[in-house]
């Protein structure tokens, strides 16, 4: 059974007075441990899809099953628990809390799960060490470089040991070198830890770490072959 | 609880991070708290000062009997004391009463000694009948009465004697040992031997000896003829002209109970009196000062309201500013209630800090004010540090902050996570 499966998923939302149909009947499956890149032009529905995969949002229609639960059946509080425990997010703009140190930022998801201070501390330190920031744990986000901030964000995404890592343009604000090291880190999460990594990106180089690329176009899976794909498109299960 | 402490830490960090704005907000609260604490503390100080003065004179074992129109609801203001009928022997016989002393007042025909030319000064003058016990048992009410050298005050068993105010003794041309004639009702009259003349003010014993506005004899400018209480009976019959009665109770009795008993017994006999204890006076004073305090604190409370609006404004700004942060917190597993709690703690903390600083300032200011007011009116005002007030203020200021933060916190917690994350 796939870890995530979407069947006929649509998502409409209102932007002012206009109805935006962000997803228009999307079918896809993602297996456990896969690295999947979701690509597509702006407005193709990438972010909306990511929000649904991360249980931040629910579909307007269709079935979105994640780890055996249909998102539509979950109450708001269950969605919160779900994303707190099963999903870790990495954002393009890092989205660290400026008032907290690197260590405290990594501890934040654990606070909401009610994990005790000493355990939190130990885990956060381990994670920061793992992303190569052992000597930066007391620094505030504004005292860190972009690459370092994104490493903190990756460590934070791993805080509650989730099965799924969702990265939205994780290299979008980074120079090539920093970007590459973040991509290596994400890849490692799949190969070493068996995590499912979903990468939303514009960047074909970033997509290279993926086992499979899912292309979106106007809210649907784009089944056309790209002119020159660095890797072969996987089966989109469509 | 563990989560609460963590949320507390998050809220505190956010406050510290926005140091300047937080302080400005706190100042808004602390001005209000300072004003309220200052005014209430001064009010409490006044209240205590006055009550202590009253209890210093009254003691907890004494009550006063006055005409019922003189005290309590509907008491008339101004004018002299109302006279009332009193059966002093009945009062003395009531269970729990140790000593009772009364003052009667009449206007009587008085005739002095003939002078060298044989002229006799005579006229209608105020005559006071004083229980001997007034001078021995109730000095705290009467003050230290002083007669001029060679004279004395009343003693038990005295009947045909009088003590004159200094002025009238001069005008009547009499001195200790002389006799004066006082005529009462009908053909009752007595020749009274003068046993003392009140000292004029400059020779009076220290005026600070107490005397709770109950000086019944005027000193130099008085023209009262004072006689023993019992002598009044001989001149005017049973007392229907008492202006005040002081009663001391026996040890082990409750003053309010004895006073109630006395009031009932006397009124059953046709008197129309009130027995007023220290508690009654304290209550009356307390009522007055608390009305004034509440009024002033109410005015000061307006500034608290302004402080509260300041907290609300700051919190709304903060929610707006941190929309993205709220989105992130929710994305990493924060429940609505978590977000709500963090923001409430934050606003409550600003209120509390305002409360702490405001209370300290308020207590300091009220202490200073007591000193200055005390100096201006030459009284020592007690500075009251009420732990009840401090506790209530701290709790109230936290509640004010939290209350002002309710709406902004609710708004923050209801932000849809996707919109919040997109917010730029």
Image (tube, coloured by chain):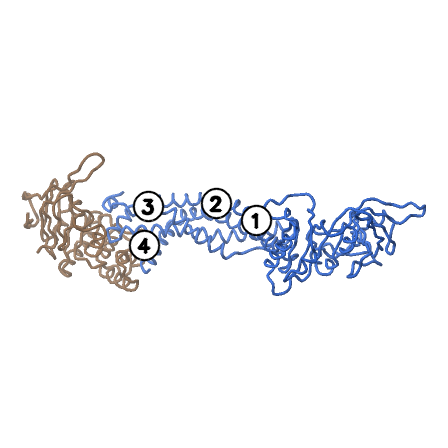
Chain colours: A brown, B blue
Mark 2 vs 3, N-terminal side: 2
Q: Which residue is mark 4?
A: A100
Q: Secondary structure at mark 3?
A: helix
* Residue drawn at the location 11% of the way across and 57% of the way down: A32
Callouts 4 and 1 on one subunit:
no
| Residue placed furthest toward the top | A17
Residue receiving disc 3: B319
Q: Say which chain tag 1 marks.
A: B
* Residue A237 picture location, percent across and down: 6, 49
Q: Which dot marks residue B299?
A: none
Tag 1 secondary structure = helix
Percent across and percent down for residue B331 are 23, 51
Q: Secondary structure at mark 4?
A: loop
User: Which residue position is annotated with label 2?
Assistant: B301
Q: Are marks 2 and 3 on the same chain?
A: yes
Callout 2 secondary element? helix
Q: Residue furthest right?
A: B117
In the rendered view of the protein, which quadrant contains the N terminus of chain A? bottom left
Return the mark for residue B289. Answer: 1
Location of residue B133 in the rendering, given as x and y in whole percent from the top left corner: 73, 59
Which of the 4 quarters of the picture holds residue A114?
Answer: bottom left
Q: Chain of mark 4?
A: A
Badge 4 crowding class, 10 Å Cα cut-off, few under 14, some 14 to 19, many 20 or more, is many
Q: Residues within 10 Å of mark 1 (few under 14, many from 20)?
A: many
Which label sits in the foreground, 4 or 3? 3
């Amino acid at each position: 059974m796939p870890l995530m499966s979407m069947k006929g998923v649509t998502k409409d939302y209102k932007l002012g007075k206009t109805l935006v149909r962000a997803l228009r009947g999307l079918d896809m499956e993602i297996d456990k441990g896969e690295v999947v890149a979701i690509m597509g032009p702006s407005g193709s529905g990438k972010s909306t899809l990511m929000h649904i995969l991360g249980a931040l949002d629910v579909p307007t229609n269709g079935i979105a099953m994640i780890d055996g639960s249909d998102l539509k059946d979950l109450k708001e509080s269950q969605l919160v628990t779900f994303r707190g425990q099963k999903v870790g997010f990495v954002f393009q703009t890092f989205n660290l809390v400026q008032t907290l140190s690197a260590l405290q930022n990594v501890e934040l998801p654990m606070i909401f799960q009610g994990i005790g201070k000493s355990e939190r501390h130990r885990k956060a330190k381990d994670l920061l060490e793992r992303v190569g920031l052992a000597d930066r744990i007391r620094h505030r986000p504004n005292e860190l470089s972009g690459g370092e901030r994104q490493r903190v964000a990756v460590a934070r995404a791993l805080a509650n040991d989730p099965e799924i890592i969702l990265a939205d343009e994780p290299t979008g604000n980074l120079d090539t070198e920093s970007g590459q090291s973040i991509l290596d880190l994400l890849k490692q999460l799949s190969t070493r830890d068996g995590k499912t990594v979903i990468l939303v990106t514009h960047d074909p180089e970033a997509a290279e770490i993926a086992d499979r690329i899912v292309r979106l176009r106007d809210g649907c899976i784009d089944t056309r072959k790209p002119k020159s794909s660095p890797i072969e498109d996987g089966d989109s299960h469509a | 609880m563990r989560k609460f402490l963590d949320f507390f830490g998050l809220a505190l960090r956010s406050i510290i991070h926005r140091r300047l704005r937080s302080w400005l907000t706190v100042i808004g609260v602390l001005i209000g708290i300072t004003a309220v604490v200052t005014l209430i503390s001064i009010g409490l100080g006044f209240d205590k000062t006055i009550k202590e003065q009253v209890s210093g004179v009254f003691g907890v074992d004494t009550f006063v009997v006055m005409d019922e129109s003189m005290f309590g609801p509907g008491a008339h203001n101004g004018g002299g004391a109302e006279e009332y009928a009193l059966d002093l022997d009945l009062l003395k016989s009531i269970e729990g009463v140790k000593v009772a002393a009364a003052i009667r007042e009449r206007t009587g025909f008085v005739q002095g000694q003939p002078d060298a030319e044989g002229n006799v000064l005579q006229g209608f003058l105020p005559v006071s009948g004083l229980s001997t016990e007034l001078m021995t048992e109730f000095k705290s009410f009467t003050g230290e009465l002083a007669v001029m050298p060679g004279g004395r005050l009343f003693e038990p068993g005295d009947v045909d004697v009088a003590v004159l105010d200094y002025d009238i003794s001069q005008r009547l041309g009499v001195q200790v040992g002389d006799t004066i004639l006082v005529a009462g009702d009908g053909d009752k009259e007595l020749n009274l031997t003068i046993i003392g003349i009140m000292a004029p003010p400059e020779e009076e014993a220290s005026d600070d000896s107490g005397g709770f506005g109950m000086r019944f004899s005027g000193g130099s400018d008085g023209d009262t003829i004072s006689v023993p209480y019992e002598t009044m009976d001989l001149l005017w019959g049973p007392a229907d002209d008492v202006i005040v009665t002081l009663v001391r109770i026996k040890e082990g009795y409750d003053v309010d109970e004895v006073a109630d008993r006395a009031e009932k017994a006397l009124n059953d006999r046709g008197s129309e009196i009130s027995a007023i204890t220290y508690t009654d006076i304290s209550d009356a004073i307390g009522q007055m000062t608390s009305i004034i305090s509440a009024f002033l604190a109410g005015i000061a409370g307006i500034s608290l309201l302004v402080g509260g609006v300041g907290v609300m404004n700051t919190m709304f700004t903060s929610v707006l500013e941190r929309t993205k942060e709220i989105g992130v917190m929710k994305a990493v597993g924060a429940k609505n209630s978590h977000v709500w709690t963090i923001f409430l703690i934050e606003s409550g903390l600003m209120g509390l800090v305002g409360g702490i600083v405001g209370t300290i300032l308020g207590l300091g200011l009220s202490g200073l004010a007591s000193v200055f007011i005390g100096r201006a009116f030459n009284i020592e005002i007690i500075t009251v540090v009420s732990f009840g007030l401090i506790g209530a203020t701290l709790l109230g200021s936290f509640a004010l902050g939290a209350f002002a933060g309710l709406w902004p916190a609710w708004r923050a917690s209801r932000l849809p996570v996707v919109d919040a994350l997109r917010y730029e």
